[in-house]
Image: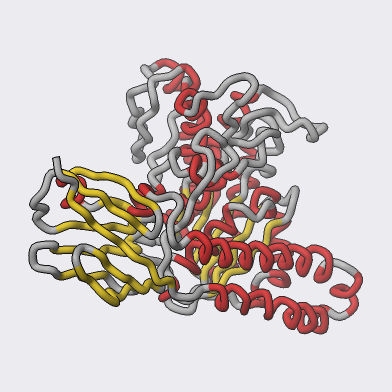
């Protein structure tokens, strides 16, 4: 099927799905044509939504030494989900030795990035790229076929240009909107219509990814569900609302960016196995997975040297502007942040685990199954080292915005682009080096004590 016929069929299916979904119980997925669809929650907020079933994440897409380009609009330029991704790749899977650049540009649509990607991005020979476009491409108005065709055409062109340069691609959908953008003069329609439009663009992004043989990262559907249900789960009030899509309804706080990072990292094929430390108190033995060395073990106390960190998420669980709260909205810990302590054949019914100066109690079943230290101990011996890595990532990514937007697209870049690249790369290098210098092994202690009943 040629491009125009395939797109016409896709648009027909999008329109037909929305129509069918209006007349059927929303909790029942609609089967239409060759596609399957997501299970839709039985809630009035989802009436009319029947998104196509997103593809499952594949195996690991990353290779050692990859150069990752994180591309998107002002939501990417916030340098929040991009920072989570880079910090995760640096601290949690350092063996991959992935380096990162972010290319966020406020107000950008797919045509904008297509026009600058050769200069701004491909100049630096990325091997992997993530894309997060669609919010501005929706033009803040109800869906129409012409705009859908425009978005598909430009998104596909970006993917194809990356593929021509042997870049592996993750196509991200847009997120959802929590409010109508107040700053857009040409906006029209209701918030519901805007989100239906974003949902339709999500399905078009799936079509682009599948037909081009690249990965897809679903941002819209988990974010929209979180936007509907998170306020009730996090004790939101009029005075303290829980705003997944952010205070302006378009630019998420940390919780929304966790959803974005989770979707991208899953689509990159990361498995989340950061550490498994196994202890046998009866035999007096302990072992650890790759990246961790048992330096000493005696009387239930382990000294461990780790070159892989858990992703340290702290803050108020009910605050949409904390990473820890965002991790309650998607299975980030379960799928991406498993730092496990397991006890073989526990002889007692209950145990106290101390990790550094922090302690918690667990029953024998939990200990045998494995407790996720990254979840149970938000404050832990890695936090200080983790924060140093994260701060270095933030500083480098901030410079990358200046490098691209102010220098490459400023007078210096227009006058002599290659000279501008050479100068700014000299300034960027110590910032990049600071990330690897901050990533040092951490020595930590674990103690397991039986609690006498």
Question: Residue 271 appears in which quarter of the rendering?
Answer: bottom left
Considering depth in this image, is 122 or 200 the residue closer to the camera?
Answer: 122
Residue 333 x, y percent position in the rendering: 38, 49
Residue 167 x, y percent position in the rendering: 52, 71
Q: Is residue 154 above or below residue 384?
A: above
Whether residue 211 appears in this view of the structure is no
Query: Which residue is at 36% across, 74% downward?
Result: 305
**Does residue 225 appear left or right of residue 157 in this picture?**
left
Q: Is residue 170 above or below residue 109?
A: below
Considering depth in this image, is 151 or 135 the residue closer to the camera?
Answer: 135
Query: Which residue is at 57% across, 29% downward?
Result: 242
Considering depth in this image, is 299 or 23 the residue closer to the camera?
Answer: 299
Whether residue 39 appears in this view of the structure is yes
Q: Is residue 67 above or below residue 25?
A: below
Count of marks overlaid on the render: 0
**Does residue 292 appear left or right of residue 172 in this picture?**
left
**Does residue 451 appear left or right of residue 196 in this picture?**
left
Query: Which residue is at 51% across, 44% downward?
Result: 219
Considering depth in this image, is 262 or 217 the residue closer to the camera?
Answer: 262
**Does residue 442 appear left or right of residue 124 in this picture?**
left
Q: Is residue 439 above or below residue 43?
A: below
- What coloring was used for the rendering? secondary structure
Query: Which residue is at 14% across, 40% downward?
Result: 453
Q: Residue furthest front?
A: 452
Residue 48 x, y percent position in the rendering: 48, 22
Question: Residue 186 appears in which quarter of the rendering?
Answer: top right
Residue 330 x, y percent position in the rendering: 42, 42
């Amino acid at each position: 099927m040629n491009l125009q016929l395939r797109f016409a069929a896709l648009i027909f299916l999008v329109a037909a799905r929305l129509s069918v979904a209006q007349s059927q119980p929303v909790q029942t997925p609609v089967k239409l044509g060759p596609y399957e669809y997501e299970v839709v929650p039985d809630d009035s907020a989802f009436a009319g939504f029947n998104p196509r079933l997103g593809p499952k994440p594949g195996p690991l897409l990353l290779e050692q030494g990859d150069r990752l380009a994180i591309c998107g609009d002002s939501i990417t330029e916030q340098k929040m989900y991009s920072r989570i991704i880079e910090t995760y790749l640096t601290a949690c899977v350092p063996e991959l030795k992935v380096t990162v650049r972010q290319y966020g540009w406020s107000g950008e649509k797919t045509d904008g990035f297509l026009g600058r990607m050769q200069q701004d991005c491909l100049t630096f020979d990325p091997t992997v790229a993530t894309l997060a476009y669609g919010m501005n491409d929706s033009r803040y108005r109800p869906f129409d076929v012409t705009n859908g065709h425009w978005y598909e055409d430009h998104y596909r062109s970006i993917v194809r240009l990356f593929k021509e340069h042997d870049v592996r691609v993750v196509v991200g959908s847009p997120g959802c909107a929590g409010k109508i953008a107040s700053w857009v003069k040409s906006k029209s329609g209701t918030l519901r219509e805007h989100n239906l439009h974003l949902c339709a663009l999500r399905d078009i992004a799936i079509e682009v990814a599948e037909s081009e043989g690249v990965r897809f990262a679903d941002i819209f559907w988990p974010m929209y569900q979180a936007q509907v249900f998170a306020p009730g789960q996090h004790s939101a009030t009029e005075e303290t609302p829980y705003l997944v899509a952010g205070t302006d309804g378009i630019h998420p706080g940390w919780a929304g960016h966790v959803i974005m990072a989770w979707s991208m990292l899953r689509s990159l094929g990361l498995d989340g196995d950061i550490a498994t430390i196994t202890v046998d108190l009866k035999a007096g033995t302990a072992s650890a997975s790759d990246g961790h060395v048992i330096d000493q073990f005696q009387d239930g106390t382990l000294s461990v040297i780790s070159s892989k960190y858990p992703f340290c998420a702290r803050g108020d669980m009910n605050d949409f502007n904390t990473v820890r709260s965002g991790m309650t909205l998607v299975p980030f810990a379960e799928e991406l942040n498993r730092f496990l302590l397991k006890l073989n054949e526990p002889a007692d019914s209950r145990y106290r685990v101390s990790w550094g100066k922090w302690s918690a109690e667990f029953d024998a079943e939990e200990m045998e199954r494995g407790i996720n230290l990254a979840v149970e101990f938000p404050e832990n011996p890695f936090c200080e080292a983790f924060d140093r890595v994260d701060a270095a990532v933030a500083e480098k990514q901030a410079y990358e915005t200046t490098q691209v937007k102010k220098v490459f697209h400023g007078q210096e870049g227009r006058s002599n682009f290659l000279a501008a690249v050479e100068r700014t790369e000299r300034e960027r290098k110590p910032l990049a080096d600071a990330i690897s210098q901050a990533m040092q092994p951490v020595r930590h202690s674990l103690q397991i004590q039986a609690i006498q009943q």
